[in-house]
Amino acid sequence: MLVKNDDLIVIEDLNINGLLKNKSLAKHIQDAAWGEFSRQLEYKALWYGARVVKADRFFASSRTCSSCRAVKAKLLFENRTYHCETCGLELDRDLNAAINLARWASTAPAVNTTSAGTSSVAGRGGEVRPRRQKRANEAHPDEASTKAPPAVGA
């Protein structure tokens, strides 16, 4: 669903081994199979022409203010709301990170690459799918009319 509906998907390249050191989260992280999810996402994105961008694991998406871009020195995991001491911004920690990742993606490389280094259009002859159009632009106004046809011979 993600690769069919979105042209750009941003994921973080997390240090899974480091996260597994947290005893209370380790089992849940292993059950989620984040590495396999990431691999499948990139694989399926090639089918549909979506672009998957991995943010560098050292990019401070959660600790950076999405408004003024000030970076906190430390942000505890249990702090689920982001508070910026510089500008006063207060919002959900995950939403703040998502805004920062979307901004980061706009400066990321323009080509989706797989581990083999091929681009999403390699060997396919160009665009995999056409860009979406608004419904109003798909048909001529007279083409899909619901008006009753004129009576013949009347």
Image (tube, helix red, strand yellow):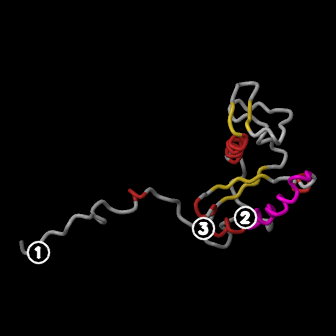
Q: Which residues are magenta?
A: 22-42
Image quadrant holding the C terminus, namely bottom left
Report the number of discs: 3
- Which secondary structure type mostly characterizes the magenta part of the structure? helix
> Which circle, 3 or 1, is nearer the viewer?
1
Q: Residue at x 69, y 39 (%)?
A: 92
Earlier along the polypeptide chain: callout 2 or callout 1? Answer: 2
Determine which quarter of the picture holds residue 93.
top right
Q: Residues within 10 Å of mark 1 (few under 14, many from 20)?
A: few
Q: Mark number for residue 126?
A: 3
Earlier along the polypeptide chain: callout 3 or callout 1? Answer: 3
Q: Mark number for residue 70?
A: none
Q: Residue at x 27, y 64 (%)?
A: 145
Determine which quarter of the picture holds residue 135.
bottom left
Label 1 is placed on what type of residue?
Answer: Val
For numbered disc 1, what is the local secondary structure? loop
| Inter-mark Cα distance, 2 to 1 | 57 Å
Label 3 is placed on what type of residue?
Answer: Gly
For numbered disc 3, what is the local secondary structure? loop
Residue that carries the numbered disc 1 in the rendered image: 152
Earlier along the polypeptide chain: callout 2 or callout 3? Answer: 2
Label 2 is placed on what type of residue?
Answer: Glu
Q: Considering only vertical position in the picture, is 26 above or below 85? A: below
Q: Considering only vertical position in the picture, is 26 above or below 105? A: below
Q: Residue furthest bottom?
A: 153
